[in-house]
Amino acid sequence: MFRLTLLRRAVVLCLFFHAVQIRGIRLSSTIHEEPTSLARALAYGPVKQNLTYLKSNSIETTTSGQDSSSWDQTYFAVHQTSSGGPTDNYYGLHATMGVYGHKLKPGQLTSTYITVTHSGDGVKSSFNAIQVGWHIYPENYGDSRPHFYTYWTRDGYDATGCFNMNCPGFIRANGALVAPGDVIKPISGVHEPVQNVTLKVLKDKASGDWWVYYGFNGNPTGVGYFPRSLFTYLAQKANGMAFGAFVVADKTLPTPPMGSGIRPNGGQGRAASFTNLRFIDQDGRSSPMTTDWPKLVTNNKCHSITPIGHAECLYGGPG
């Protein structure tokens, strides 16, 4: 089997911890990656999870492994729903986030995203997910510019899924102003005006398809959709959601900045932020997030994310 790309390895890692937390997913022989891949190491290697319950009733999860020196450097700062059971019903997520530029090299990746998921029947190969966000990924695009992207799977990233329109899946809407993979410009600077994108993923009640909306410094409009028929469990609903950021680097390279490259204690306007965080219900109506979510932070010395307050939070770090 081919070796996972940086993006796919990072997504697998994020979904691994998300799945273990919300459902205790059984990681069995459904993982078919070669033994050197990060996904294989996590599935069969010892992984520790230290849970610290915060005053806000959120959970901060710090992760580590006995042989982390053999892995690529991967760091997350994510808020995620904490359950994922049969009574959990989610139909969409909305968020506004700043877009920043960094000079990255092939072998480095920084990404900010929102995602809707379904943990399936508890086996990794039944995991369904849609991820939408912006990233800087020189290995894929041949440049160090931020790109709008989408990603999907219906089998825990074993055999299905890709980002943008690199395989059959995402269908672009007629007349859409942007497409997955497009460069985002202009970009924010620490001492310059923040340039925002607003992203929305929602399940259309009539068709059951999952629509993606994108707006640059304005209200989002439809870009296209993932057909309901593409999925198994997400064909009905999501039972988990998350938003945040991750960075990845080969062992020979420094980890890149997350968000603006400024830690949350730098304050809004310097640190990157999520604002206008909203749930979307089955009828397409949205409402602001009024409660905090559990968070996953792989190394809070490098990157962090603040509790959700007034439907917003800060995140990021220098790498």
Image (cartoon, rainbow, N blue to C red):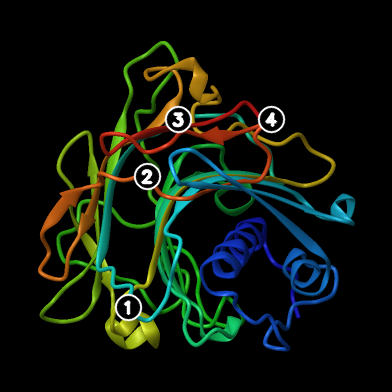
Mark 2 residue element = loop
Mark 1 residue element = loop
Look at mark 1 in the image and give the residue it sits on. Answer: 87
Q: What amino acid type is highlighted by mark number 1?
A: Thr
The answer to whether marks 2 and 4 mark residues whose Cβ atoms lie closer than 8 Å is no
Residue 1, image quadrant: bottom right
Q: What amino acid type is highlighted by mark number 4?
A: Lys
Look at mark 3 in the image and give the residue it sits on. Answer: 100
Residue reaching furthest to the top: 191
> In the picture provided, is 285 more to the left or to the right than 263?
left
Specify whether residue 21 is in view. yes
Mark 3 or mark 1: whose residue is earlier in sequence: 1
Q: CA distance from mark 1 to mark 4?
A: 36 Å
Residue at point 46% right, 33% down? 306
The answer to whether marks 1 and 4 mark residues whose Cβ atoms lie closer than 8 Å is no
Q: CA distance from mark 1 to mark 2?
A: 20 Å
Look at mark 2 in the image and give the residue it sits on. Answer: 292
Q: What amino acid type is highlighted by mark number 2?
A: Asp
Q: Counting other residues with Cα less than 10 Å from the Cα at mark 4, is it few (<14), some (14-19), or many (20 or more)?
A: few
Residue 209 drawn at (x, y percent): 23, 77
Residue at point 56% right, 29% down? 102
Residue 299 in the image: above or below residue 162 = above
For discs 1 and 4, the disc positioned in front in the rendered view: 1
The answer to whether marks 3 and 1 mark residues whose Cβ atoms lie closer than 8 Å is no
Mark 3 or mark 4: whose residue is earlier in sequence: 3
> In the picture provided, is 264 more to the left or to the right than 285?
right
Q: What amino acid type is highlighted by mark number 3?
A: Tyr
Look at mark 4 in the image and give the residue it sits on. Answer: 301
Residue 299, image quadrant: top right
Residue 98, image quadrant: top left
